[in-house]
Amino acid sequence: MTETSRERLRATFTEDAELYDRARPGYPHRMYEDLSGLVTLGPECRILELGCGTGQATVPLAATGSRLTAVELGPEMAGVARRNLTPYPHAEVVVGAFEDWPLPPDPFDLVFAATSFHWIDPAVRAAKAADALRPRGVLAVVSTHHVKGGSEEFFADTQPIYERFDPATPPGLRLSPAADIAPDDAGLAASGRFAPVEVRRYEWDLTYSTREYLDVLRTYSGHRALPAPARTGLLAGIADLVDHRYGGSITKRYLTELMTAERLA
Ligand SMILES: C[S@@+](CC[C@H](N)C(=O)[O-])C[C@H]1O[C@@H](n2cnc3c(N)ncnc32)[C@H](O)[C@@H]1O
């Protein structure tokens, strides 16, 4: 991704923060259990979250009692996150790009990024996350992959619609099984600031009605960035497919990946 397209696409989420809040799923409970085995979450723990969105992972992290600061690029996303965090006064959200945010003097025990690390400048993110951590503090990067499973033929059935309305669609694209998705360390090893990464993976399914599925598609940056007529045509074609070939609901398989690495002393 070029820098220009990254900066353009990462700014699309905040265009409809309420939609994002309604439509985007959170993360599996098992992921938080594993994280709590790596970092002692609770009132003594200081967490820095990067790109919190409307609080998909922020709320469960704040519920552990940990003190949390989230840096979120989108003002509207931050506003909804603050609303969702009302019961947790020890959690705060600041608006800004992580690249530009001045690090506070006290280091964090955990730097956490859910489906957001790839939106941060690759030349900055690993080193600045390390700078934010105490020695042996943990960086946790959560990634979401769309994998083969659920309504198996559905993804293939959508491809002619994507090829018609989105010229960037590679011809004949198919989803891969989770086992074929190669881990990507997001440049942590090359930064020289972290111990070797550990990767944990969670596969899970979510069933969507036609309207729910269209809502989640409308939160994706690539879909949001399409010209309006193409987006309208694409969503209408998919709605027609779900309604008339899948009886009004489809099941989507997610692969959530939790990658963690300790900051070197
Ligand atoms: C795909 S959303 C993920 C939101 C949420 N963490 C989740 O798990 O659904 C990416 C979020 O990162 C934010 N973001 C993108 N680039 C950022 C940056 N450089 N600094 C801070 N936040 C950023 C976006 O505004 C958006 O809210």
Image (cartoon, grey):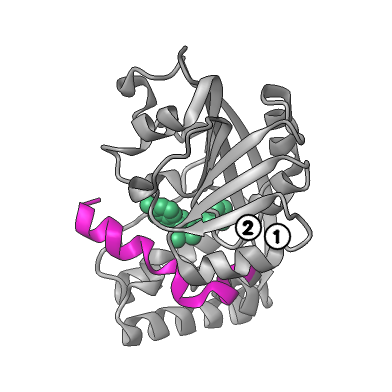
Q: Position of residue 203 (x, y in %)?
A: 64, 41
On screen, 17 above or below 178? below
Magenta-span inclusion, residue 118: no
Q: Nearer the viewer's eye, disc 2 or disc 1? A: 1
Badge 2: residue crowd in 10 Å (few <14, some 14–19, many ≥20): many
Q: Which of the numbered marks, if any, corresponds to residue 85?
A: 1
- Nearest the camera: 77 or 150? 77
- Label 1 C-beta lies within 8 Å of the nearest ligand 1 atom: no
On screen, 186 above or below 213? above
Q: Position of residue 159 (x, y in %)?
A: 40, 65
Q: Position of residue 251 (x, y in %)?
A: 66, 60
| Segment colored magenta | 1-21
Magenta-span inclusion, residue 9: yes
Q: Name the amino acid, label 2.
A: Gly
Q: Name the amino acid, label 1.
A: Leu
Q: Mark 2 or mark 1, which has the lower sequence index?
A: 2
Q: Is residue 207 left or right of residue 195?
A: right
Q: Which of the numbered marks, if any, corresponds to residue 55?
A: 2
On screen, 217 above or below 265? below
User: Distance from label 2 to label 1 (Cα)?
Assistant: 8 Å
- Label 2 C-beta lies within 8 Å of the nearest ligand 1 atom: yes
Residue 170 in sight from this viewpoint: no
**Which SS class for mark 1?**
loop
